[in-house]
Structure formats: C-alpha cells, structure tokens
Image (tube, helix red, strand yellow):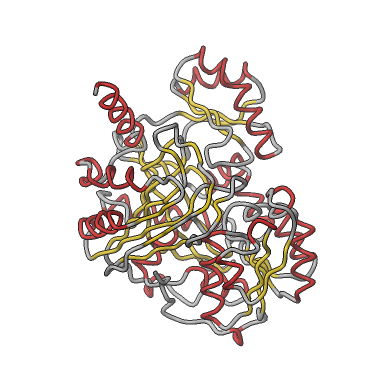
Amino acid sequence: MSEASSTMDLSAADGPIRRVLVANRGEIAVRIIRTLKRLGIDSVLAASAADRESMAARMADRTVCIGPARAADSYLRIGTLVEAARGVGAQAVHPGYGFLSERSEFAAACSDNGIIFIGPTAEQIERVGNKLEARRCAEEAQVQVVPGGPVDNLSAALTLAEQIGYPVLIKAVGGGGGRGLKRANTRAELESQFELASAEALSAFGDGRVYIECFVKQGRHVEVQILGDGHSVIHLGDRDCSVQRRYQKLIEEAPAPGLPEGMRCELHAAAIRFAKHINYRSLGTVEFLVDVARQRFHFLEMNARIQVEHPVTEQISGLDLVAEQIAVAQGQRLRLTQADVRLAGHAIECRINAEDTAHDFRPVPGKVSGVHFPACPGLRVDTHIEPGAAISPFYDSMIAKVIASGDTREQARQRLEAALSEVHIAGVLTNVALHREVLATPEFRAGGFDTGFLGRFLAERGAAAAAN
C-alpha cells in the first residue's frame, strides 16, 4: 500500500522547504503527507471542520481548521489558506488536485506572500486553464488540435458546426472535468444545448464562454505525463484513460495498450513540444484524443497539476512524482534526463467511489463500518477511509484507488481482478462490483477500446437486466 520511491531521493536540507501546508483532503492529502514524512519535511494539514478527525489529520504533524464543511467556506478560500500557511510558518503549499490546484489566483497569492506554490507558475496555470489559449499554444508548438474554435453566440456555433460537421462538442473555455460539456448530434440538439452548456460553464468556472469542437466518434483518451523545471522537459510515459462515464474517468492504465510505437513516440514528442513552448515548470499532463479510425491524434488540453491517476505512472517508472514536484518547486533543475527514465511493466488503477450504481451512480454519503483491502504482490491502495470514517456529502465520492502492476498488462489485470474480489467496504455502497465486471469483459481484456466503451457496456447491461 506504499507509494513509489524516487530513484534519487530528496532531503529537506536540499532546499528552502522545511514545512508544507497541504491544502487538500482525502486520499491525495494522505498521499502527499506520506512523501513529506519520507523526505523529513513537516506537514500541516489544512482541514475543514468535517475533516478534523480524518486519516490525513492524524498523519500530519499538525492540523489547522480552515472553516466549515462546505468547500466554498474552507478548501476554496484563498485568503484563508494563505493566512494558514503564514500562521504555521510553512514555506510552501501543496494544492493536490481539484479545489484550488488549477486556480492561478491561488498560485499568485502564494507567490505574493513569499510562499512556494508546489506546482506551475500562475501564468502557466492561466494559459493552459483557458482552453482557447491552450489550443493556441498547441498550434504554435505544431501540435495538431481537434477541428473547431471559439463561438460568441448560438448563431456562430451553428455556422461553425456546419463547417466542421456533426456531431460536435460544446466545451467550457474556463475548465474541464465534464462540466459545461455537451454533445450535439444535430442542429436541433445544438440549439437546445448551447445556452445550457454556457450556463453550466458560468456556474462551475465563473466563465460562460464556450467553444465548439468536432466529436471524434472512435476516440481514445491518451495522456502523457511530463515534468519540467522551466528550462528542460522530460516525459514519464503515457496513460490510457478511455474507461469513462459522462467524461469522468473510472479506470486508467500505463502504458496505453495497443498503440503503434511510432504514434507513441509522436505523442511523447508532441507533449514535450507543448510543455517546452510555455517553459513549463512542475508536473503536468498533456491530454490527447487518438482517432482510432484514422490513426492520428489531436491535442485536448493540459492539466497543470498532479493527476488522480498518477500512481500508474509511479508504478511503471519507480518514481515518486510528489517528490519530483517538490524538488522543482525548490528551484532545482530536473534530477533526471530522458535517458534516466526507465519504464517497465504495466499498471492499472480503479477509482473506488461511494455511489449507487443501480440508481444512476448517485453518491451515497454515510459512515464506513468496516473496510478491508488485501495485501497482494503488485498491489497498491491509496485511500483515506478506515472503520468509522465519515463519507461526507460535501465532497467528491471517490474513497480509494486500487492499483495493480505486473510484468504484463494481463498479469496486472488478473491481479487487480483478484484483489477487488477481496475488497470489503461496509456501511456505504460502492462501485467495486462494477469494476470487476468491466475488467472481465473481452473488450477490456483486449485493450485499445474507445471512450464509448463503458457507455455501451452499461447500456447492454441495463438492457439485459430489464429483459430478465
């Protein structure tokens, strides 16, 4: 259940960071604290009132309460977090993923107050966070983008859609994660979805602007993990995240199976070109849509933070990506060259969510009365739950990540399938059984499926249940 270790370890004496405020919660907070402990760096957890008794709070050297349970009153309050960091004498803040991790205002506020933001610069977050600016950067770096562009109103959207062809996607300029994203198969659907997508984007990101992209009917979601220091950039391999439901990832693996090696090399090179173009600093992920039918790929976006799925990269690389983030944040040049990166084996991750899969995957908060994760060769579990843990209705429903690795993809798949059969979580409903079903399908065994795979599987599963 332990994280990967960097081939070149960092000690607190190597830079100015002696204490870090962890501005997050759940499994990623636990994950970050474990690395800080290994590096001899003091950890202070910024916790809401709902998380004061959490596993992360017990693990941290110190915990400070930053407000009530609602994220808007705690984890999303930039001023409160900056004051908390200053108050405890933290030299740095680690934002994890989600919450404020990709808010340029947070990175800028940290910098303005002499606090190291363990991540990219505020300007870089701003550039890649604006999806239109990110598309422009990709084009400047000679990385192919999906046909489409910005639209100011419905009339412009209809004109562009006719040019690039249906179906199209309406996407939010200011964010991702499936929010503000709508698919329109026809002109009538675009007319009915456009204003709704804009309203959702405004609500989620404070920016109602949208843009239109061609929808690739058989597309794989493949991403490249990169690491930069503002001068040099290297890649740490690729991942496939095509098992998605409503644009939310469920299963991820590294490396992406079934890619022609020529295309794999081109993906890595394109990701590095993009990151070098903006002199990227820190850990980041460049995401691509691979057109299965035409065997070509397009730039989707860049995530300027650590990813939920980073463990699969750690498992095949032997690196601690949080430690590498910290090293760069301290002003160090990359401790690795591309030749130093050794990728071996295969790893697959399942996101375990507290949700009712029989009722439209509705989140089910509650109290965990019992939990068991097996200890098996090649198995890693990242979690923050334990008996008595409260699953709050205020936060994301993900409660654990189960990761299996092996010499081959099939070995990793079999290990993961076997491990999930032994997972026991009592008190709340979870999607563990669904994961086991998906892993056993012929399509998943074969690999190389597109992002529509899970939707088709669920539809067939629902139809079979209705027939019985």
Q: Quadrant of the N terminus?
A: bottom left
Determine whether, in the image, residue 64 is placed left or right of residue 444: right
340 w.r.t. 425: above or below: below
Image location (x, y in percent) of residue 203? 68, 34
Determine whether, in the image, residue 34 is placed left or right of residue 67: left
356 w.r.t. 24: above or below: above
Between 290 and 434, which is closer to the camera in this rendering?
A: 434
Quarter location, residue 371: bottom left
Determine whether, in the image, residue 260 is placed left or right of residue 86: left
73 w.r.t. 86: above or below: above
Image location (x, y in percent) of residue 63? 68, 70
Q: Quadrant of the C terminus?
A: top left
> Which residue is found at the position 41% from the left and 46% from the top?
430
> Which residue is found at the position 37% from the left and 48% from the top?
251
Instruction: Name the outermost residue toward the bottom.
Output: 13
Between 394 and 244, which is closer to the camera in this rendering?
A: 394
Between 373 and 322, which is closer to the camera in this rendering?
A: 373
